[in-house]
Each structure stands twice: as structure tokens, then as C-alpha cells.
Image (spheres, rainbow, N blue to C red):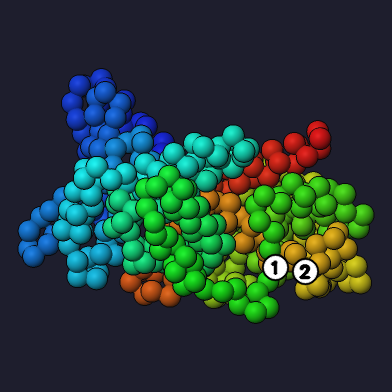
Amino acid sequence: MATNRLTSLSIRNAFKPASASGQESVVSDGDGLSLIVRPDGTGLWRFRYRWVGKQQMLSAGRWPEVQLAEARVTRQRFRAELREGRNPSNLRKPVRKAGTSGAPSFESVAREWHSARKNRWRPKHTAQVLRSLEVNVFPVFGAKSFELIDREDGLAALTPMIKRDALELATRVWQRVRDVFLFAIDKGVTERNPAESVRRALPTPVKGQLPALPPSSLNELTEAIEHYPGRTETVAALKLLLLTFVRPGELRAAEWAEFDLAGAIWRIPETRMKRNLAHLVPLATQTVSLLRELSQLTGNGRFLFPSLTSERRPISDNTLNQALKRSGFHGRHVAHGFRSLASTWLNETGEFPSDVIEKQLAHESADPVRAAYNRAEYLDQRRLMMQVWADHVEATTRKQQRS
């Protein structure tokens, strides 16, 4: 069964005929999730499933308050409960009652906490904080009162992030949950904070884990790359690694024959991929421009980044790491860290499903069932995602240059 059929654009387009006809319509995202499109410009997310041989339906929120990425997260939660042999409808009945019992819900207090602190943060960070809760926490226990939230709820919220190796995001999100509980304690809403016990359940970083800068340090990184005093080709390699976030080895040995600049696509053959699976990398307009500039230097040869000693070989494994070290990032960021930086930012925006991000990272799920569902290339969504990321990098670079 096809999943993730919808895009933000196709949803917006679905409202045009509904408005013209005055009739409701339904568009499906697959795997039980659909959107009832109303003529007044609002929509209702619905999740359909079978339980004990009977068709059942649950609400997954209202559009546009609940965007596509969040609705998909809710679908994942419901499917996870079904795989555990639990009926999502029964599990949510106590939650709805808790929301009407007079005790404030976690979501209502979290929004109050967010509102009380937003003047301390930059607008972009303010939006990211709220979005991280809306996507990862509210669908799980946002409707519950504080006294009904337990350790299992916390683990249910964190597990999807941990499974997709977004440990930094999981840590940040749970720090925000902990702060909401502390805020609720100060207000006299609750006297307990189960967030502490859940925090201890977070995996600790693996010793020797490759260091990577957080998204908040992107301006520092782009400035260092712009002012790196080494070879022009090395600067171009660092910029391309940032824009494409492929594995360093995939970039340093890249060949001009793999690129279709007119079609804005990079086809990495299976022989050069970690899992021996060919990989497509959509190229943003900024990336194509950079490649055209680079082609004036090395386009007549085989490799994008030939070695200084021989054009028949690419640059060495250590070239990019040494450049980062000389730029002041020793122990803080390595060439492989570009992948973590981009992945964390894309996950935090909540604009793109995790499956699309993982596909772009060329990660294959360890779950054979999930892997079977995720063989789709998501090429249109990935092309949009890569352009959004490149636009963010460009905006950060320009802002830094003006300051």
C-alpha cells in the first residue's frame, strides 16, 4: 500500500475544487490517513483501521492547525499501538476525559510556558521550540493532565526519535518537556516531574561518537568555510558537503560523469555507496551554481576533487577533516558531522517526514517491514527539502556577511 502520497502543495490544491463546488472531498495519504477537505478552507484528519474485524476511525486533528508532518506522526503512533495489540481508540478515551476533568492538560500549560519565554528567544528558535513539541510530544500525551502522564508516555514520545538516530533532537525535546513540568510545579499545577526518570532512559552518546555542531552554530561554520585560506577546491568541497550532506567518502571521490547539472541530480553508483545501493541526490539551485563554478577548475578531469599529486586520484580521506581542524573546529565538528547538522535542523523544522530525511541520508531501516514500505524514492519531496535546506544555508551565510 502506497504511503505518504500527499504533499503540502497537493493539499492546498485540493481545496480549490471543494471551494468551487461547495462539496466536501477526501484525499488520502495512504496507510489509513486521509484528510476531509471542506469548502470553507478547513480540513479534518482521519485515521481508519480495522479492529477485531470492524472498521474504526479516529481523529488526527484539524487542518491547518495540524499540518501534514504532524498528522503522519500521529498515524505512526496509532500504528505502533496496533502493532502492540492495543486499540488506539480505547487508549485515548481516558485522555479525552482527563482533558475535560478541570485539570489543565500538558499541551495547554506547555503553550503557556512557551508564551512566557518567547521574548527571550529569537523568533526562529521560538517557532522551532513549539514545533518540536507539536510534532513529537502533543500527539502522545498533550491532552493528558499532568497527574496522568507517566514514564511510559515519555518513552512513547522519545522512541521514534531515538530509532531514527535523532538523539540530539530527542535530548532537546525532553529538556523542554522537563522545563514545562518545572513551570507547572511553580504554578501549583502538579508536584511531580516524571521527566527526570525518562531523561535517564535516554541513550548516552557512544564513546568516540563523531562530533558535530548543532544547527545554532551554522553561522560560525559558514563563516569559517568562506574564509578558509586553503585551495579553492577544498572550500568548494566543504560547501558541497554542507549542501548535500552525503558521506564524506561519497563526495571526495565524486566523478563528473555522475552529475546531470541540467536535470539537477547526482547519481551515486552502488559501487560507491555504503550499503551497495545506488543513491540519488537532488541538487538545489545553489548547489548547481557551485558545481558549474567548480567545473571551470576541474571539469576536464575525472574527479571533482583531484589530488594535488595526481589527477588520477581524488583527495585523501583526511583533507576535509584537516581543513575543519585548521578552521578551529578540532573536537567540535568533523566532515561526517555535516550529516548530523542537516538532519537535526530538518527534523526540528517538522516540515518533512522522517522517512524522507532518512532516504536522503541513505539510511536503510533495520526493520524489514518498514524498509519494505520505504523503498519509494520520495524524489519530489527530497528535491523540495534540499532546496529548503540550501535556502537556509544561503540565508545564514548572507546574514553573517552583513553583520
Q: Would residue 353 be visible to someone looking at this image?
A: no
> Which one is in front, 277 or 81?
81
Q: Would residue 61 be visible to someone looking at this image?
A: yes
Residue at image coords 30%, 26%:
41
Residue at image coords 24%, 24%:
39
Cβ–Cβ under 8 Å for marks 2 and 1:
yes
Quarter location, residue 333 = bottom right
The earlier-in-sequence mark between 2 and 1 is: 1
What is the three-letter code of the residue carrying label 1? Answer: Pro
- Residue 288 x/y as whole percent: 69, 46
User: The residue tagged with tag 1: helix, strand or loop?
Assistant: loop
User: The residue tagged with tag 2: helix, strand or loop?
Assistant: loop
Q: Which mark is residue 331?
A: 2
Question: Position of 124 compared to 78: left or right?
Answer: right
Residue that label 1 marks: 211
Quarter location, residue 154 = bottom left
- Quadrant that contains the N terminus: bottom left
Q: Residues within 10 Å of mark 2 (few under 14, many from 20)?
A: few
Distance between mark 2 and mark 1 Cα atoms? 6 Å
